Amino acid sequence: MTVALIFVAFMLLLGLILRQRVGIFRWLYIPSSVIAGAIGLVVIQAVLMGPNDASAISWARDLAQTLSSWPGFLIAIVFAGMLLERKPAPIRQRVQGVARQGLMVWIIVLGQTAVGLTATWLLVQPFYDVPNAFGMLIETGFAGGHGTAAAMGEVFKHPTIELAGGLELGTLMATVGLVYGVVTGILWINVAIRFGWVDPHMTKASLKSQAATDERHQPEPIGYSAISREAIDPLLVQMVWLTVAFGIGMLMQACVVSAAVWWDAGTTPQLAKDAASGQLAQRLTASSVLDFPLFIYTLFGGLAVRRVMEGLGLGHLIDSSTINRLTSAAMDILVVAAIASLNLVATQALLVPFTVLLISGAIWVGVCLLVISRRVLPAEHWFQLGLINYGMSTGTTATGFVLLRVIDPELESGAAEDYALAAPLSAPFIGGGILTVALPLIVLQQIPIAISALGMIAMVFVLTVIGIRWRATPAQPDSSSL
């Protein structure tokens, strides 16, 4: 842990220096944290691929493994501060946005399966002997990530599928998706800024440039407005609120998972005949369905702390600006850790058909971000929310927040809250959930791929039409406010 912290600190320092000295980074709105992560990735990969020094290779592997465990923890910290630092919008104002976000995730992920099956049917199977489930690799790697790739490796080995190298191909898709998501995400951010989809003055890059050129700019101390220093250090007390919110979230998650495990223990499970069936059975248990990411629980932990403090008449002790600075620091560290720990070692098996799927998936997620999202997601932050989805659908949620950090550094747009609240609508089912595991086992090998592909296309089309019409329907006035 200590070595990893020192490594990240040095990378951030190098990233800051490069950003200040190299104009292209400022012109492209690339934050110092992204540059630092890229440098860290180069350093780690250079050691892994360099001279056969066992101690150096072991150091690089341990460092990458440590950094790869940070994003999930840091995202939970960021979400703990969201509703802690500011009052949430009334629920009636959020329902529409959350529901549209949930629908958009289904469109993206089912679309990845539809595109993968279509490409396999029309472009791959005429030349390569691959099973129908080969088309699931886009969803497995892009939306599912490395964890889903590992689970689906067992499914792909099932006797009814027999996809040789399914684990390796899924891992490769997840790895390439992570790199692709960050690189092209920065590209789309620049397109969005230059087309006026987002305010360039909202970006962290613009804010830093403005601060550097404004001689009258004086940094403001943080943590001094909430409480006197004689009682407790003002910065420390804000860290306490954030830590308590995080702890409440962890407790909520533990209670839900424990209750689900107790429920599973009280039922009579069907013994899995093989590893693939075991993966499906595991996805159907209550503990799996209800095991939402920690950040969903810490979001409500922050809300609980704010509500309690306000109920006690002590809400003024929560300094929103300081909480924001602490979560912003966590986001910068998250960016470095997520990029530097990317795994670029993967197999080259079935490279040509794999490339066909990769290109097809890349085109689809681009269409979802640039075309469908702006017609389905809430108009006020469609691009910000679309960016989180873009990162999620090309690897991990952490990638989405790496990108969001560039154009919404203070997380003020409301996109992050919509994403978190909508996650339970999709996470248990797609992108590594029940349907992801069940589809190749139950459907794809029993139904001709043409029917499966056309059926999935029809489903995505219907969901897209529903989303577009929903967005176009004028909102009804709230009768309670009349």
Image (tube, grey):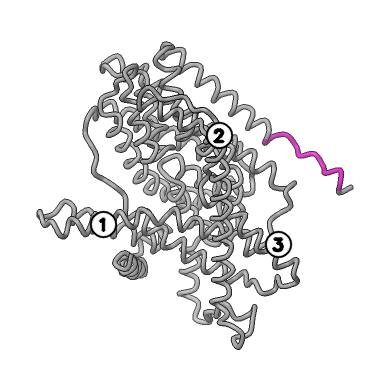
Does residue 94 belong to the magenta stretch?
no
Q: Which residue is mark 2?
A: 266
Label 2 neighbour load within 10 Å: few <14, some 14-19, many 20+: few
| CA distance for labels 2 and 3 | 36 Å
Q: Amino acid at mark 3?
A: Arg
Q: Quadrant of the N terminus?
A: bottom left
Please determine whether, in this image, residue 458 is positioned above or below residue 201: above
Label 3 neighbour load within 10 Å: few <14, some 14-19, many 20+: some
Kindly identify which numbered label has been placed on residue 62: 1
Looking at the rendered structure, the secondary structure element under dot 2 is helix
Judging depth in this view, the residue of 151 and 401 nearest the camera is: 151
- Of the two numbered discs 2 and 1 on the same chain, state the one appearing first in sequence: 1
**Residue drawn at (55%, 50%) of the image:** 253
Q: Are marks 2 and 1 in contact (CB under 8 Å)?
A: no
| CA distance for labels 1 and 3 | 41 Å
Q: Which residues are magenta?
A: 471-480
Q: Residue furthest right?
A: 482
- Of the two numbered discs 2 and 3 on the same chain, state the one appearing first in sequence: 2
Instruction: Judge from the rendering whether residue 456 lies leftward or rightward of residue 69; answer left or right.
Output: right
Residue 359 x %, y %: 35, 32
Question: Does residue 21 appear in this view?
Answer: no
Looking at the rendered structure, the secondary structure element under dot 3 is helix
| CA distance for labels 2 and 1 | 40 Å
Q: Identify the image quadrant of residue 29.
A: bottom left
Q: Amino acid at mark 2?
A: Gly
Q: Which residue is mark 3?
A: 307
Judging depth in this view, the residue of 218 and 478 nearest the camera is: 478
Looking at the rendered structure, the secondary structure element under dot 1 is helix
| Number of numbered labels in the structure image | 3
